[in-house]
Image: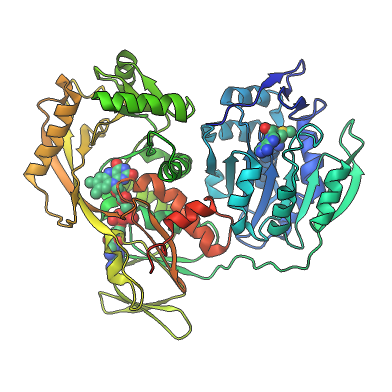
Amino acid sequence: MNSNSSVQFNEQGVPVSTTFDDIYFSVDNGVDESQYVFLAQNGLPDRWQTLSAHGCFTIAETGFGTGLNFLLTWQRFLEHAPSDTRLHFVSFEKYPLSRSQLNQAYQLLKPVAEVSSEFLKHYPAPDPGCHRLILSQGRVILDLWIGDINELLPQSLPQAQQKVDAWFLDGFAPAKNPEMWQHSLYEAMSQASYSKTTFATFTAAGSVRRALQQAGFLVSKVPGFGRKREMLCGQYSESNKLKRSDRRNVTIIGGGISAACTALALTRRGVDVKVISPDIADGASGNPQGAVYPLLHAEHTPLSRFYWQAFSTATSFYQTFCSENWFPTGVMQPAFNEQRKTRYQRIADNLYAKESVNYLQPAEAGEKAGVPLGVPALLYPKAGWLRPEAVVKSIFKAAGVEFVKAKAVSLKQTDNKDWNVLLDNGESLSAERVVIATGHHVNSLLPQGIEALPIQPVRGQVSLVQTTSKLSSLKAVLCFKGYLVPADKEHHCVGATFSRNNDSLATKAEDNEENIRQLTENAQQPWAESLDVKTARVSVRATSPDHQPVAGSLSDNLYVLTGLGSRGFTSAPVLGEMLACQLTGELMPLTESALRRISARRFQS
Ligand SMILES: Cc1cc2nc3c(=O)[nH]c(=O)nc-3n(C[C@H](O)[C@H](O)[C@H](O)COP(=O)(O)OP(=O)(O)OC[C@H]3O[C@@H](n4cnc5c(N)ncnc54)[C@H](O)[C@@H]3O)c2cc1C
Ligand SMILES: C[S@@+](CC[C@H](N)C(=O)[O-])C[C@H]1O[C@@H](n2cnc3c(N)ncnc32)[C@H](O)[C@@H]1O
């Protein structure tokens, strides 16, 4: 967890960093300063007029601070850019401000009040890594990387080759914060820039000017804002070597949450998408209720980092696209034995921000849950539950894809590297690029010559129980070994069984008994007794040997997204974004090492 920077508010109400002895924005007028220094000197909003349909404008910023530059850019983009274009804003912050500090700072920033109040709804907990927030119905993406820019740039940079259109250099003054203005920053800028890339910075320091010139920028000194005499701005001077995004059409096979998130991320980028599936949400993504929460280990691991980041994007995504079927009620893990007490306490005390995870004593835990628990519990306040089937349907609807109701039988590559998809109705269709998102069925579609993926089917049954007078007050999702969800239309989902190497879809009475037994034994509470199972649903998870999803390119024009295991609704939104960025050549929300760990090619010998 990153500690908050030491911030005080001066007499005018402007935040001041006591660590760096510098202000976050101008005392004279923060909004006008941001407009003049960062937008105007980068030629904005005028340059947005030249974006092509579905074009994306990418801005990278050093030092997110209060987010003023981002908020103003977001607002101006909505006001001025053509409605079929998108903004991708990438910013780095080592000392994230707390929500209440932001709120206080926003009192001075009334001209951006509308977007700032929207932003506060999405502002993530200050845990390390990239938080991809999907705003304004997907027209605006914010990648907020929490951590030191010197460490993060080398990890996020290799895939940023020539993709940044404008730089906002806004760390504190070089004299006060020399650690941020290092060679690695300028080197990264050079790699991520192309002939139309511009930059602007409030500083006129000679060291910054020289470093930017050495990195390949033409640098101009222009009058500064307010009391500042001069500032720097300029343009990258190398010839245009940019390979801009490629928008050829994509065919996605599958009708679950993986396919839905990928489809929406692609159509938002102007890609034509066709989806082939026998139905929508007919596989693992069709349960009546599902929980969305991160996976935490007793120490930070690459897996827990991935899920943490995925969780941040997921909550922002469901809030934006599925608010009617997403219920951020909080998810609780009762510490029903001594081992769990120790582990949960350690997680909450040492690893994450308080607004992400809390360890509650029994009385408070019971109050939060709405039913007595009798034991302490870990609470994820931003987590919750959703209606999977309705969510998948609404994402597909928002994506507006062409839907082909059929099963794909085989894939054959043609001489020009397109794909021929044979369907079970005897028809076939041609596809330029294919994404296989068929859960545990992935291998049956892999063409000859491509090694099978080590995906294992794991059967799971959820039981739907009638609510009772004792249980109807349940407010949060409870996760013991399985989970129990607050009532939806008088029913609670209890689940789920976990049967490896099994893809049988028949429901079993003994699985319902198992779900209820687990709940009763672990909860040890009257509300968990005498529950009446009304119905059940079986489906099959796709799991990988290292518990990581399997995502990305597999061979020429062929991609997969599978292996989402037991937490597909947490990981699918960020994975859909990742895949869409890979297909269109945009900046991805994951570090190089995270991408390697989930790569679809990692099993190839
Ligand atoms: C019992 C159970 C409970 C779960 N609970 C949760 C939970 O609470 N929270 C959570 O986050 N996750 C949960 N999961 C996991 C989550 O459901 C999955 O990770 C997620 O649904 C996987 O989505 P998917 O799109 O990859 O696969 P699926 O939803 O299985 O979709 C695969 C799609 O591919 C289609 N398809 C297959 N073969 C073909 C073909 N040849 N041609 C065309 N289409 C094809 C299918 O018809 C289907 O539409 C649970 C899983 C189970 C089994
Ligand atoms: C002047 S403020 C940024 C103002 C901001 N752009 C805004 O709109 O409010 C500078 C920011 O840079 C951050 N910062 C300083 N050094 C950093 C580093 N090495 N890595 C990442 N962020 C850093 C500070 O914490 C601070 O929030």
Q: How many marks?
A: 0
- Residue at x 73% of width, y 62% of height: 194
Q: Residue furthest top?
A: 363
Asked whether residue 278 is in view, the answer is no
- Whether residue 501 sits left or right of residue 14 in the image: it is left
Residue 184 position within the rendered picture, expressed as x and y whole percent measured from the top left: 71, 49
- Residue at x 43% of width, y 24% of height: 349
- Residue at x 54% of width, y 34% of height: 123
Residue 259 occupies quadrant: bottom left
Query: In this picture, is 159 found above or below 387?
Result: below
State the residue in front, 496 or 282: 496
- Whether residue 25 sits left or right of residue 552 in the image: it is right
* Display colour scheme: rainbow
Residue 467 occupies quadrant: top left
State the residue in front, 329 or 412: 412
Q: Residue furthest bottom?
A: 415
- Whether residue 192 sits left or right of residue 471 in the image: it is right
Asked whether residue 410 is in view, the answer is yes
Residue 242 occupies quadrant: bottom right
Residue 478 position within the rendered picture, expressed as x and y whole percent measured from the top left: 28, 30
State the residue in front, 193 or 57: 193
Quadrant for the C terminus, please.
bottom left
Residue 40 position within the rendered picture, expressed as x and y whole percent measured from the top left: 80, 46
Residue 85 position within the rendered picture, expressed as x and y whole percent measured from the top left: 62, 56
Query: In this picture, is 444 found above or below 392?
Result: below
- Whether residue 504 sits left or right of residue 132 in the image: it is left
Q: Residue furthest left?
A: 509
